[in-house]
Amino acid sequence: MIITRPRDWERIIANLDEVGATRVFIMGCGQCATVAKTGGEDEVREAAARLEAAGREVTGWAVGEVACHEGGTRLTTRKNAGSLETAEAILVLSCGAGVQTVADARPGTPVFPGLESAFLGNVVRHGVFEERCQMCGECVLDLTAGVCPVTTCPKGLLNGPCGGMWEGRCEVVTDRECTHVLIRRRLEAQGRGGGRGSLAPKDFSKKLKPGAVNLREGRAREGRARGGRDGGSGTTGGEDGR
Amino acid sequence: MSRLREALARGEFVVTGEVAPPRGTDMSGMRGAVETLGPHCHALNVTDNQGATLHLSSLAASRVVLDMGVEPIFQQTCRDRNRLALQSDLLAAHTLGLRNFLAVTGDDPRGGDHPEAKGVFDLDSTQLLEIARGMNEGRDMHGRELTGATDFYLGAAVFPEAEPWDVQLDRALRKVESGAEFFQTQAVFDMDKFARAAEDLRPSGVKLIAGILLLKSPRVIKFINERLAGLMVPEHISARIEAAEDPLAESIALATEQVRELRDLAHGVHIMPLGVDEAVPRILEGAGL
Ligand code: SF4
Ligand code: SF4
């Protein structure tokens, strides 16, 4: 799931001030932000109380099923059309994807993010989240015994360890095991240890922005930039702008 | 042609040193270090934004060293540049006359003076070596022909004292597979561990240059133990420096002993005098070099 964190409250207030908004509608998210305890009903109510304490009027609030679901969010905005109509700004307690979904559903109203989007997280246990995958588009877990070096090695090295590893621990995040020691130990335990070559450099064209998949058209759009292949005019690089 | 490579090929026991480019444009400090160290060393490493802190580039500084008549070892970390920039700088380095190249991963920006920087790490040092070897053969990383090849003597770092050794060794052998012809090691304190590394690496044919760090004061030891990743000064050594009346003299004596012991185990020494450059000739002389 997507892990979000509370955003600097001063910045949120400054955003509202910039557009002179005194009447605010708050949207949460019933999925990830609810589990992350940043944008569920409780947090939305809390934000409402805080805004009121700061002299703003909260015209209403809603926590839809999934903020990033365009159809669902449109439905939520339609259901709350009345209180949205009187709002001068919308504060969204969800990840950035959800914020944009709301902004698309209400293009005439300033929409502000109420959270910081942090990472795709594993739920280690209730309230404890850890980043294990960066969705790099070219998974190497088949070669690394199910341990992601892209994400869990702070430097994202495919071949390690780096020179700072000490007694099997990571030099950067010193309270954890070095990813590359862990990978090697697991491979060995599975009898896959010996003769492993080096991993080739990652293909970042597998993960060009923005990603898009369209099952209806029966194909995934691979974000592959055109141009610049033979060092030709730099201006042609990535001309299709994806 | 790299003179360092030639000396090692001849079986000479080599000495390398290290200079840091300035944090600014005034080259006088670095020139002074080159003048002191140059006459005693086969080559001098020129560091690349060491400790993830801003310095003048290793590329330009390496050329300054070369112009002073001393052979540089151009260092590149994988931290600050992507694969296009790294390859481009390797081509530049060759045209500037640089013939030794050391590929290192680089410290994480979080530990440096720009902690908010994006650590690039588009490649790791093993991959960078592989690419540099290809460029020596006239190809870019995709195997496409270059109009003129590079000619680098390729080096990498190895860490003989960091456990677990089997993981370190595996990594070192991968680096050799990828093109490393010489290693410079992290500071050596434990001769048994160094001997183990030398023995395990011998079959690969790689040249091993042992790191000697001048432990000039108890404060430096404290700094190493607390702040430098991948390095720990053993108790008996720190006790010796702490108990000494003149810690600097004692550290020079210690380094001299270490060089003497390493003469039989390594192909050379890499001396890191931590600013006390004038200690280097004393150490070498004391060790009979
Ligand atoms: S390699 Fe790591 S980041 Fe890439 S898809 Fe696999 S788990 Fe995710
Ligand atoms: S110690 Fe291991 S996990 Fe930590 S940065 Fe280095 S290679 Fe990555």
Image: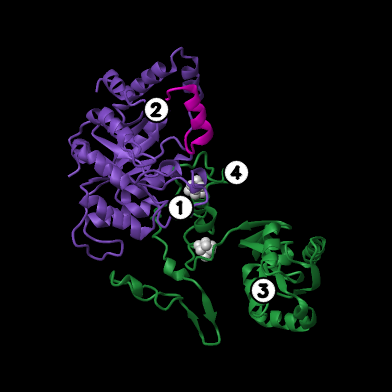
Residue A32 shown left or right of residue B179 in the figure: right
Q: Is residue B33 above or below residue B284?
A: below
Mark 1 vs mark 2, CA separation in Å = 29 Å
In the figure, the shade used to draw chain B is: purple
Q: Are marks 1 and 2 on the same chain?
A: no
Q: Earlier in the sequence, mark 3 or mark 1?
A: 3
User: B280 and A110: which one is in front?
Assistant: A110
Q: Are marks 3 and 1 on the same chain?
A: yes
User: B10 and B280: which one is in front?
Assistant: B280
Residue occupying image coordinates x 49% and y 39%:
B229
**Highlighted magenta segment, given as a residue range:** B215-231
Checking the image for residue A110, the label placed there is 3
Label 3 environment density (alpha carbons within 10 Å; few <14, some 14–19, many ≥20): some
Amino acid type at circle 4 is Asp
Label 2, secondary structure: give it: helix
Front disc: 1 or 4: 4
Chain letter of disc 1 in the image:
A
Chain letter of disc 3 in the image:
A
| Residue located beneath label 1 in the image | A193
| Residue located beneath label 2 in the image | B191
Asked if the magenta segment contains residue B216, the reply would be yes
> How far across and down, in percent of the image, does residue A84 sit?
76, 78
Front disc: 3 or 4: 3
Front disc: 1 or 2: 2
Mark 3 vs mark 4, CA separation in Å = 43 Å
Amino acid type at circle 2 is Met
Mark 3 vs mark 2, CA separation in Å = 67 Å
Q: Is residue B238 above or below residue B170?
A: above
